[in-house]
Amino acid sequence: MKQNIFIMSNKKNWPLWEIFVRSKNGLEHRHFGSLHAADAEMALENARDVYTRRSEGVSIWVVESKNITASNPEHNGEMFEPAQDKVYRHPTFYDLPDEVKHM
């Protein structure tokens, strides 16, 4: 009992984990939410209990939030506009052969 009290009192210091779940008919993992846990194993178990209660998932990823690097939405122009200069990345840059009918 003493150990449980210690664990619960330190819960506010647990790191935040981001949860990604791949559904049964999905090909990619989607962000489902966040939770606090003492370690990756606990985060995985809690994510299973919270986010896949109806057996809708086949795979779970947990990532400690501090390990995620994200772009700043306020600077999206600097990040994404250079791609507009690379027309070879656009599908309209390429000519389709006459043999290809369904594209």
Image: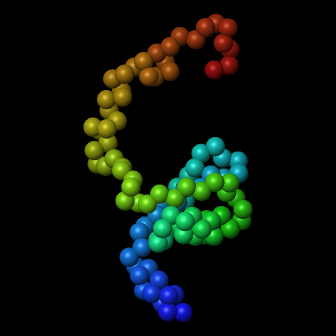
* Image location (x, y in percent) of residue 60: 59, 56
Q: Nearer the viewer, residue 31 or 100?
A: 31
- Quarter of the image for the N terminus: give it: bottom right
Q: Looking at the image, is 6 positioned above or below residue 94?
A: below
In the picture, measured across the screen, residue 15 lies left or right of residue 75, that is right
Which residue is rendered at x = 68% and y = 68% of the image?
A: 53
Return the residue nearer the eye: 24 or 46: 46
Q: Residue furthest bottom?
A: 1
Q: Taking 13 as reference, is 85 above or below it? A: above
Q: Quadrant of the C terminus?
A: top right
Which quarter of the picture shows residue 75?
top left
Q: Residue at x 36, y 28 (%)?
A: 83
Res 34 visible: no
Task: Please tell me how many numbered marks the rendered image carries.
Answer: 0
Residue 85's image quarter? top left
Residue 74 visible somewhere in the drawing: yes
Q: Residue at x 49, y 18 (%)?
A: 92
Asked if residue 77 is positioned above or below residue 17 in the image, the reply reads above
Q: Where 75 falls versus 1 (above or below)?
A: above
